[in-house]
Amino acid sequence: LIATALMPTTLMFTKITKNLCLSVFLILFIAACETVPVKQETTVWDDPLWQKHYKLLKTFEQYQIKGRIGITHPDDSFSSNFLWQQQEPNHFTFRMYGAFGQTYMILKVQPHLSTLDTGDDEHYEGVDARQLLYGVSGWDIPVTLMQDWIKGLPTGINKSNLLINADGTLQQIKYLDYVVDYIRYDDAELPRTGTDESDDKTISLKMPDKIRIVQNNGAQGKNKIVLSIRSWEIAPSGD
């Protein structure tokens, strides 16, 4: 009698467990599909869509982005919020900070001087921004190259080392020992200047939303940087 009384409960529990496992599996499967976008077909440098996008990217130099940065070295990993403010070529501020606004470091770069201030009120100076950042933090981040890479602009890159998406955005850059993959894009607005009241005040364009930068250091392993960008603010264009 005891066994007979327990049997329906056991069967019900087993059924609920199977349904729960199936639901969890479906949720994980859907999430995986959403976070791994399908790569587009590639196109050529002279594609009109890419040429239009490329020329728009070259019309502005000032921008600000906010997001998350993840840094992975063979023996270390770190993640934080970040703010990047670009004033002009080789003149920018790169801040990394915690969830409650606590500053980890602020790197300020100008053509002939870079400064780095830490959350512990330590101050450092140097000419090479990348070497300064590496010497203080141990993070090898190609900040000077990233000024254009963040925009999806392949300045100084040979055409044969690029992959261009069919929608006219950049898919991949190969430069020296770096591979830069543009995982995802989002819509952004480029303000116009000198427009009449009847004209559109902005130009729509796609800007990187997620970027992965991998540096192959041979026997030392790989360094990886992942930028997840939450917002773009672009200064007015003269277009």
Image (cartoon, helix red, strand yellow):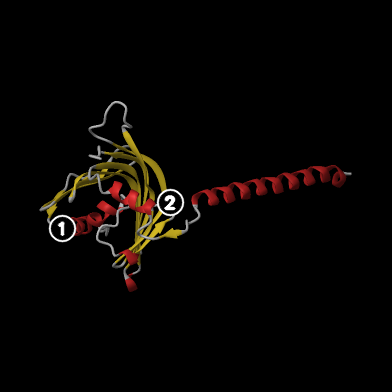
Mark yes or no: residue 131 visible: yes
Q: Which residue lies at the image location 50% right of the left edge and 55% below the top edge?
A: 38
Nearest the viewer among 220 and 160 is 160
- Which of the two discs, 1 and 2, labels the residue nearer the N terminus? 1
Nearest the viewer among 232 and 218 is 232
Name the residue that disc number 1 marks: 128
21 left or right of 111 in image: right
Where is residue 44? Give x, y as percent.
39, 60
Mark yes or no: residue 75 visible: no
Nearest the viewer among 93 and 135 is 93
Give the number of callouts. Answer: 2
- State the separation of the CA atoms marked 1 and 2: 36 Å
75 up-or-down from 192: above or below: below
41 left or right of 224 in image: right
122 left or right of 22 in image: left
204 up-or-down from 38: above or below: above
Tell me the crowding category of disc 2: few under 14, some 14 to 19, or many 20 or more residues within 10 angstroms, Cα based. Answer: some
Where is residue 222? Give x, y as percent.
35, 65
Where is residue 210? Give x, y as percent.
39, 50
Q: In the image, what residue type sits under mark 2?
A: Asp
Looking at this rendering, what residue extends furthest in the bottom direction?
A: 219
Q: Nearer the viewer, mark 1 or mark 2?
A: 2
Name the residue that disc number 2 marks: 167
Q: In the image, what residue type sits under mark 1?
A: Asp
Looking at this rendering, what residue extends furthest in the right direction?
A: 1
